[in-house]
């Protein structure tokens, strides 16, 4: 028999190729498992099969090129390509098998048998490509041992590839170690098979080519193999990084969407569900109760004495108190109940309880925990609660009716002395029905254009010339007549109707101001009040800008009046909104100044141009020295901050003269002019100042006459 020899460098190269091919196989198995679509999984399966099959085949082919006999040697190209196809098919089967979700021992055994047979077939087909004459003889024991090694190595490779297909922090290191083991196993099978081959003396190789250099052929095969495997690995790594970044972005987007959804459905301060989420939960509760003929209770909770705490200690203390109340209620209700904050100091509890006695127990417990003393920033605070209860009894009532009924019962509890609960009764339905009808009429009134604006003139304090007007909303109801705002504004604010109504008010006021500007060349200002609900509405800035543009009205004609408590509630947010309005050119007036809790540090930062003294201070000016002192302080503060000072509610000459002497910029009140319709302002614009002066002079003369007449004894 011929005795063969090996080129050590090529043997080492074949072992390295086997290890690299094994690592590529493990990496491809991971990419297939991580694929998100069938198409990408199929693409990685095909590409991985070719890369892995070519790598394993290259190891065998280089190992054969490393072997030399004392005769010319060569390999039949057709048979060699068949062995390559067998290697690719075996690799494809292996990758498909390990891409399954589960891989039992039975499947590993069957897969090892088929894959090992394929690898062995690849090797011995490659040997047959030499076309030896006579044919190669194989030692049976070594032949069977090589097949056994192939099957065992295949089984181990399948098990390793399956368990290392998931990415982890140490996956690269583990795959590297596994690739070394698999590489030695594959090389062991190959060289065991080569050892089994017997070449009789005198044998010839019919596939030999005289011009073929096995060394250079090995270099070419190794180069192409390394290039192919490297490209496959680079693509795999880049795809893995792209997938990782995509996963991070997807996670970030999902978290952002989740956070936005949470913010849209929860109160920012207490993190409780807001009105929107409460309405959804209430709708679900009604559907479930109708289906199961069950009951549930709605408890409307309003804090007693909260406004006094807010005014005395400031909004930050009030917010902390609300948060503490929310916590106390939350820990004393069941997980299945829903507690929502729907505004200010109002909470609503949706309780899965229909028995009045059980609901009463819940209400008593809440009253007890709410009235306990609070310790907030070294302040000892006390508040109580009034609770109205409405029980759903499968009587086809809608969500707003349940809320209205619970609200009516809550007001009944307040009128009965506070710190108590009341169940809704039919006797209270008049008030609830009245509010419900009011809401319906408000919607119809807006559609039918039943709202009208009256305008109360403002006068320069020194000259009594007309300096501006304030738009005042009235409702011309077809049955109730002219409805004053204090009868419908609270319902509009509570139900959110104030937003579309406020938009109409601003639009109509700007339209009218544009008419006066064009008709009389008027240089007055138009003051429009903003409610707290409007001020916190996300579309306020855009709405103001669009309204001014729609009527081609310059922003300096518009004065937006914001109450002191609204402006100081969330100072940072308020300053952002007011700054945007000021940058637009709109003037800002702080209304009802002196009635709330102000911080001078924040007040000086607010971009206001005007302070408006509350009529409550003006009303008792002649009889209350404290009110006079407060007004004097406000005027002095306004002068220091370069703000205009407007006093409203001026009804007597004493008030007018005192306010003028202090330095108020503008005056407003019944002494000078009552609110009038737009056509009256248009007709009497030149005469309003004269009428105001005459009224002031007549009142002044009457006052002088009264003071000069001796009093009777």
Image (cartoon, rainbow, N blue to C red):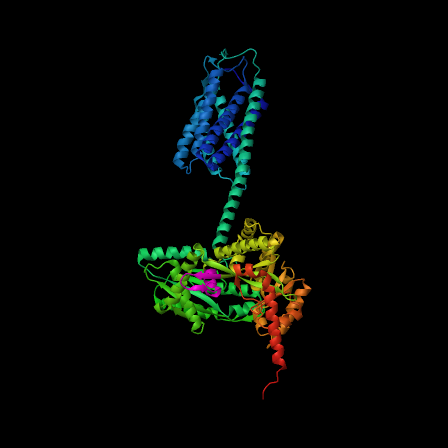
Position of the C terminus by quadrant: bottom right
Res. 266 in view:
no
Q: Is residue 559 rendered to the left or right of residue 304?
A: right
Q: How many marks overall?
A: 0
Identify which residue, 102 or 650, lies in the foreground: 650
Q: Is residue 473 magenta?
A: no
- Residue at the outermost bottom position: 713
Task: Find residue 360 and report its horizontal and vertical position in percent.
Answer: 38, 68
Q: Is residue 161 visible?
A: yes
Q: Nearer the viewer, residue 177 or 611?
A: 611
Pinpoint residue 107: horizontal percent, then vertical percent: 39, 34
Q: Is residue 617 above or below residue 48?
A: below
What residue occupies the far right of the structure in this picture?
640
Please give the range of residues in magenta: 474-494
Q: Position of residue 420 (x, y in %)?
A: 43, 71
Q: Is residue 278 left or right of residue 392?
A: right
619 lies above or below 209? below
User: Closest to the observer: 153 or 573?
Assistant: 573
Residue 485 magenta-drawn? yes
Q: Along the line of sight, which residue is nearer the eye, 181 or 324? A: 324
- Residue 393 percent coordinates (x, y): 33, 62
């Amino acid at each position: 028999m011929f005795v063969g020899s090996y080129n050590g460098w090529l043997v080492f190269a074949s072992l390295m190729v086997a290890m690299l091919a094994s690592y590529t196989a493990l990496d491809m198995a991971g990419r297939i498992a991580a694929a998100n679509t069938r198409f990408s999984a199929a693409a990685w399966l095909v590409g991985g099969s070719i890369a892995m099959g070519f790598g394993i085949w290259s190891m065998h082919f280089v190992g054969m090129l490393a072997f030399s006999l004392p005769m010319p040697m060569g390999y039949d190209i057709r048979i060699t390509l068949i062995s390559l196809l067998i290697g690719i098919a075996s690799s494809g089967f292996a990758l498909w098998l390990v891409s399954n979700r589960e891989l039992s021992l039975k499947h590993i055994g069957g897969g090892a048998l088929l894959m090992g047979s394929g690898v062995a077939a690849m090797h011995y087909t490659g040997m047959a490509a030499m076309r030896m004459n006579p044919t190669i003889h194989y030692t049976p024991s070594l032949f069977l041992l090589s097949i056994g090694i192939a099957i065992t190595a295949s089984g181990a490779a399948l098990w390793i590839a399956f368990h290392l297909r998931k990415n982890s922090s140490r996956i690269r290191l583990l795959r590297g170690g596994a690739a070394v083991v698999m590489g030695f196993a594959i090389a062991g099978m190959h060289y065991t098979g080569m050892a089994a081959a017997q070449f009789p003396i005198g044998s010839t190789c019919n596939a030999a080519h005289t011009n073929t250099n096995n060394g250079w052929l090995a270099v070419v095969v190794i180069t192409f193999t390394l290039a192919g495997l490297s490209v496959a690995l680079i693509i795999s790594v880049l795809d893995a990084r792209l997938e990782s970044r995509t996963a991070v972005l997807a996670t970030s987007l999902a978290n952002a969407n989740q956070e936005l959804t949470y913010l849209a459905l929860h109160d920012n301060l207490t993190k409780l569900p807001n009105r929107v989420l409460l309405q959804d939960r209430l709708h679900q509760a009604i559907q479930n109760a109708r289906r199961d003929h069950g009951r549930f209770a709605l408890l409307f909770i309003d804090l007693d004495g909260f406004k006094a705490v807010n005014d005395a200690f400031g909004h930050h203390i009030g917010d902390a108190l609300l948060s503490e109340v929310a916590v106390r209620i939350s820990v004393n209700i069941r997980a299945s109940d829903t507690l929502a904050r729907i505004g200010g100091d109002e909470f609503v509890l949706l309780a899965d309880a229909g028995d009045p006695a059980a609901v009463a127990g819940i209400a008593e417990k809440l009253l007890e925990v709410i009235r306990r003393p609070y310790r907030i920033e070294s302040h000892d605070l006390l508040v109580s609660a009034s609770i109205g209860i409405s029980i759903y009894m499968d009587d086809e009532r809608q969500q707003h009716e349940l809320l209205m009924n619970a609200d009516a019962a809550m007001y009944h509890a307040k009128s009965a002395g506070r710190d108590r609960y009341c169940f809704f009764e039919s006797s209270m339905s008049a008030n609830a029905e009245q509010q419900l009808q009011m809401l319906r009429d408000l919607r119809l009134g807006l559609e039918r254009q039943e709202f009208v604006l009256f305008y109360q003139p403002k006068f320069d304090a020194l000259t009594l010339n007309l300096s501006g007007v304030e738009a005042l909303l009235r409702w011309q109801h077809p049955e109730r007549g002219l409805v004053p705002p204090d009868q419908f504004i609270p319902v509009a604010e509570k139900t959110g109707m104030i937003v579309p109504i406020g938009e109409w008010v601003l639009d109509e006021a700007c339209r009218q101001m544009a008419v006066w500007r064009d008709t009389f060349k008027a240089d007055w200002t138009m003051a429009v009040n903003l409610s707290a609900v409007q001020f916190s509405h996300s579309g306020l800035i855009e709405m103001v800008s669009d309204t001014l543009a729609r009527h081609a009205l310059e922003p300096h004609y518009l004065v937006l009046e914001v109450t002191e408590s609204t402006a100081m509630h969330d100072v940072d947010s308020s300053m952002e909104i007011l700054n945007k309005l000021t940058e637009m050119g709109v003037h800002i007036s702080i209304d009802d100044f002196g009635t709330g809790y102000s911080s001078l540090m924040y007040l000086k930062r607010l971009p206001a141009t005007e302070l408006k003294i509350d009529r409550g201070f003006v009303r008792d000016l002649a009889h209350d020295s404290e009110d006079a002192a407060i007004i004097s302080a406000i005027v002095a503060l306004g002068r220091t901050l370069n703000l205009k000072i407007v006093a409203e509610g001026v009804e007597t000459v004493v008030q007018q003269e005192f306010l003028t002497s202090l330095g108020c910029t503008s005056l407003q009140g019944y002494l000078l002019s009552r609110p009038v319709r737009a056509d009256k302002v248009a007709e009497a614009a030149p005469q309003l100042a004269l009428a105001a002066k005459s009224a002031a002079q007549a009142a002044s003369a009457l006052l002088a006459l009264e003071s000069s007449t001796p009093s009777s004894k």
